[in-house]
């Protein structure tokens, strides 16, 4: 049985297959409309979500399956003190596959150790968010036609932003991918990723504070929100929250073929005036999230199409 804990759980070849299937799903949705008839997806969300939970659910519904689950810890027995290990044992009796989001790093890993159904990590604290990465890879691949030979700017909360952590792990496997890490000093990429992933694999990167200094050199700009819920005090969050605001004026510094991605939700870091710029790809990105999760569910359930 296969789970998805990190984007590295799939080889580059397997990722290519997954993206190929997602592209086929986009082109021929009717071909996939019944491949999960009779199957159930459980969504176990101990942390808020809009896109990740609903796109998993939409994905299963589009495949002919059904969904059950909870969308906050308060409405589950976690509020009575039930452990993740016990909860997943029970969910294994009710569903064929599950997607779990939890505020604690490693929670999904605990779940898969006690699960008899495939577990998808839908975000574990500030650690990883592999299905967002699958979405991001599919988006970049669809926009650029490649995942190699590019310069990616990652901007905002690189310390707590799990989408950035997972995306870096995934992208370093493609040749000649360079990074520009754009963050304030306090929100820099953690050392365990900078040293153990980038330095160890000799990946070219530079760290800058000013977005303006990075923009002209980028193929992709990946904006992120300051992760309010992971701050230890409100004061630090308030000081950091509007550090970056991408607006039309700054977009003038960017190449004509650069694309702006954002896992969403956005707060203030992308001004709404950028939405009408043809380079803004974040809403399209959310749509790709459904196709890739459909391909993921089919793959983890080992269904032949
Ligand atoms: C991200 C997350 O939950 O980490 N959201 C998402 O799943 N699209 C990003 C965020 O919350 O900032």
Image (spheres, rainbow, N blue to C red):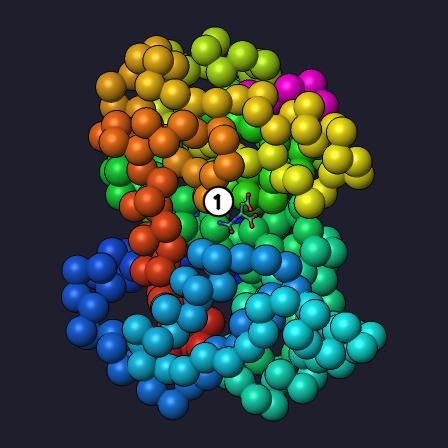
Report the front residue among 290 and 11. 290
Image quarter where the N terminus lies is bottom right
Q: Measuring 38% from the left and 55% from the top, which residue is drawn there?
A: 289
Q: Is residue 286 in sight in this rendering?
A: yes
Report the front residue among 11 and 297. 297
Residue at the right extreme of this rendering:
81
Q: Is the CB of the residue bearing disc 1 within 8 angstroms of ligand 1? A: yes
The quadrant where residue 294 appears: bottom left
Q: Across the whole image, how many numbered discs are drawn on residues?
A: 1
Q: Measuring 35% from the left and 13% from the top, which residue is drawn there?
A: 249
Q: Measuring 66% from the left and 64% from the top, which residue is drawn there?
A: 46
> Going by the image, does 193 lie left or right of 258?
right
- Circle 1 SS class: loop
Does 40 appear above or below 236? below
Q: Measuring 42% from the left and 77% from the top, which residue is drawn there?
A: 302
The magenta region covers 182-189
186 falls in the magenta region: yes
Image quarter where the C terminus lies is bottom left
Q: Position of residue 193 (x, y in %)?
A: 66, 34
Does 100 appear above or below 105? below
Report the front residue among 102 and 234. 234
Q: Position of residue 20 (x, y in %)?
A: 28, 56
Residue bearing the label numbered 1: 265
Q: Position of residue 287 (x, y in %)?
A: 32, 53
Q: Is residue 18 in sight in this rendering?
A: no
Does 9 appear above or below 152? below
Q: Residues within 10 Å of mark 1 (few under 14, many from 20)?
A: few
160 falls in the magenta region: no
The quadrant where residue 108 appears: bottom right
């Amino acid at each position: 049985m296969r789970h998805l804990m990190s984007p590295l759980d799939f080889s580059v070849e397997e990722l290519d297959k997954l993206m190929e299937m997602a592209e086929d799903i986009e082109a021929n949705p009717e071909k996939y409309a019944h491949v999960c008839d009779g199957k159930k997806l459980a969504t176990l969300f101990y942390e808020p979500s809009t896109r990740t939970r609903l796109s998993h659910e939409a994905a299963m519904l589009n495949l002919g399956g059904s969904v059950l689950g909870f969308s906050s810890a308060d409405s589950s027995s976690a509020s009575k003190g039930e452990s993740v290990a016990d909860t997943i044992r029970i969910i294994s009796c009710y569903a064929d596959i599950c997607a779990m989001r939890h505020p604690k790093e490693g929670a999904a890993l605990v779940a898969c150790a006690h699960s008899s159904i495939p577990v998808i990590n839908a975000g574990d604290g500030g650690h990883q968010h592999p299905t967002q990465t699958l979405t991001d890879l599919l988006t970049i691949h669809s926009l650029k036609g490649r995942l190699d030979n590019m310069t990616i700017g990652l901007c905002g909360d690189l310390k707590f932003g799990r989408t950035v952590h997972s995306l870096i792990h995934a992208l370093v496997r493609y040749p000649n991918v360079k990074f520009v890490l754009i963050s304030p000093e306090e929100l820099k990429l953690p050392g365990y990723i900078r040293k153990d992933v980038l330095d160890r694999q000799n990946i070219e990167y530079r760290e800058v504070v000013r977005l303006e200094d990075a923009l002209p050199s980028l193929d992709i700009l990946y904006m992120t929100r300051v992760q309010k819920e992971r701050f230890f005090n409100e004061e630090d969050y308030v000081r950091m929250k509007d550090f970056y605001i991408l607006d039309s004026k700054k977009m003038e510094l960017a190449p004509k073929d650069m694309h702006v991605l954002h896992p969403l939700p956005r707060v203030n870091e992308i001004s709404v005036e950028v939405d009408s710029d043809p380079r803004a790809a974040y809403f399209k990105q959310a749509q790709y999230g459904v196709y890739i999760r459909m391909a993921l569910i089919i793959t983890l359930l080992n269904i032949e199409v």
